[in-house]
């Protein structure tokens, strides 16, 4: 018999053995009638052969409208260690919250139904949590030792997303979105109420909170093969992730999250500095310096434009303001004092300057190709937009590369 309930109160279609499992692996699914059966059978066989403790596989059905519920019910009837939870709303984060919040297992994990990650990584993922060495464990496709097969588009998007996370939220883990993660149950019970996202940003938000709370995040390099039949809307997911970064960044900067208490209760080190306030302060100081640099750049460009053509004027104005911008951010934004490292910092700043030059020069080149360089006002307008993009890139690279050790 098929039973459905609201998302807030999922019903288990079949109970696990009498004693609580050590590991509960959640597989969120939506319309996966073809992949679910081979996935669960393969995972069940692997855990039976290699995992030395009791386990459970929980199929979290996110309101599927195909034959997925029937497939899940048959699997639960066949395997004592398989359960089904039916939710009437979609969302990977919603599914994980619903199952993890009610699970009695010591370690909670999840993996994507396509099993893109080699299952040989399951025990290395879970072992540090069972031993108490770590609090959260993630599979990573971006670490040295990982072996990944996927197209260039997804590779660029993945690396770009994690670069943005390092620059904006100061993360230290390498891969936020790999569908292969585990967490200790006691840690999950404290963090889950603070995670707002119910979709794809759920993973990132949980990991950022864990890091800010001083928890240890263990990374396992994985062998990963891209699923060519993936139904993830990459563009929509990327936009949702950017909105999530903005929301979480504001929450961290405002200090409204109880990170100090979490560090006191769960963290491995005392809270030495107010991490959220430091990030917020850096953003404010960088923005102020960025505004001043942009104004100085526009003034220099306007003056140089009286005797030079557009490209040389842009080059000189951007070079002068880039050197000054790096020096100011070094001292004011990131608090680096003294002469040690100043040469390397300026050299790295010039690399970032070259990227900014490419953006602004490219904008001018496009404007010239369109025949719009006769108007200085149009030139300045285009350059303002290009400089805003260059400024965002500059902050990300300053924080994640040039002054990373200063954080």
Image (cartoon, helix red, strand yellow):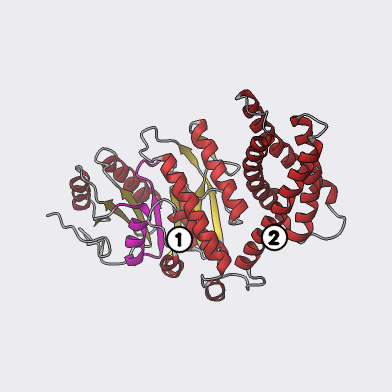
Distance of label 1 from label 2 (alpha carbons):
36 Å
| Mark 2 neighbour class, 10 Å CA radius: few under 14, some 14 to 19, many 20 or more | some
| Camera-nearest residue between 213 and 40 | 213
| Camera-nearest residue between 292 and 304 | 304
For label 2, the residue is 285
Q: Position of residue 293 (x, y in %)?
A: 74, 50
Residue 279 appears in which quarter of the rendering? bottom right
Residue drawn at (52%, 39%) of the image: 157
Quarter of the image with the N terminus in it: bottom left
| Camera-nearest residue between 113 and 199 | 199
Quarter of the image with the C terminus in it: bottom right
Residue drawn at (43%, 40%) of the image: 234
Say if residue 235 shows up in the picture: yes
Q: Is residue 141 magenta?
A: no
Residue drawn at (54%, 62%) of the image: 250
Q: Are marks 1 and 2 in contact (CB under 8 Å)?
A: no
| Mark 1 neighbour class, 10 Å CA radius: few under 14, some 14 to 19, many 20 or more | many
* Magenta-colored span: 90-115
For label 1, the residue is 183
On screen, 78 above or below 131?
A: above
Q: Position of residue 213 (x, y in %)?
A: 55, 67
Looking at the rendered structure, the secondary structure element under dot 2 is helix
């Amino acid at each position: 018999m098929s039973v459905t309930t609201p998302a807030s109160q999922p019903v288990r279609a079949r109970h696990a053995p009498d004693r609580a499992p050590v590991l509960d692996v959640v597989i969120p699914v939506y319309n996966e009638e073809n992949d679910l059966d081979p996935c669960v059978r393969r995972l069940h066989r692997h855990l039976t052969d290699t995992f030395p403790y009791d386990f459970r596989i929980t199929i979290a059905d996110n309101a599927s409208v195909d034959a997925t519920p029937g497939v899940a019910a048959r699997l639960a009837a066949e395997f004592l260690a398989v359960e089904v939870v039916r939710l009437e709303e979609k969302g990977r984060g919603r599914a994980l919250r619903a199952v993890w919040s009610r699970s009695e297992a010591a370690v909670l994990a999840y993996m994507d139904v396509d099993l893109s990650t080699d299952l040989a990584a399951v025990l290395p993922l879970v072992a540090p949590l069972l031993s108490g060495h770590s609090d959260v464990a993630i599979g990573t496709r971006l670490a040295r030792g990982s072996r990944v097969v996927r197209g260039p588009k997804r590779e660029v998007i993945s690396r770009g997303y994690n670069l943005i996370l390092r620059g904006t939220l100061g993360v230290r883990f390498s891969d936020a979105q790999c569908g292969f993660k585990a967490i200790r149950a006691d840690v999950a019970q404290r963090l889950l109420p603070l995670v707002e996202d119910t979709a794809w940003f759920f993973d990132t938000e949980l990991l950022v909170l864990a890091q800010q709370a001083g928890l240890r995040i263990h990374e396992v390099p994985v062998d990963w093969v891209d699923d060519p039949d993936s139904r993830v809307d990459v563009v929509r997911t990327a936009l949702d992730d950017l909105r999530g970064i903005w929301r979480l960044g504001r929450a961290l900067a405002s200090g409204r999250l109880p990170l100090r208490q979490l560090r006191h209760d769960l963290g491995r080190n005392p809270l030495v500095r107010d991490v959220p306030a430091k990030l917020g302060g850096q953003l404010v100081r960088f923005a102020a310096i960025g505004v001043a640099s942009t104004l100085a750049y526009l003034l220099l460009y306007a003056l140089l434009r009286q005797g030079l053509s557009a490209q040389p004027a842009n080059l000189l104005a951007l070079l002068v303001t880039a050197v000054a911008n790096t020096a100011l951010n070094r001292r004011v934004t990131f608090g680096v004092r003294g002469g040690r490292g100043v040469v390397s910092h300026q050299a790295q700043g010039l690399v970032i300057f070259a990227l900014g030059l490419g953006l602004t020069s490219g904008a001018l080149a496009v404007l010239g190709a369109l025949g719009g360089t006769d108007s200085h006002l149009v030139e300045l307008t285009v350059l303002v937009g290009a400089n805003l993009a260059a400024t965002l890139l500059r902050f990300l690279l300053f924080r994640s590369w040039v002054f990373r050790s200063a954080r």
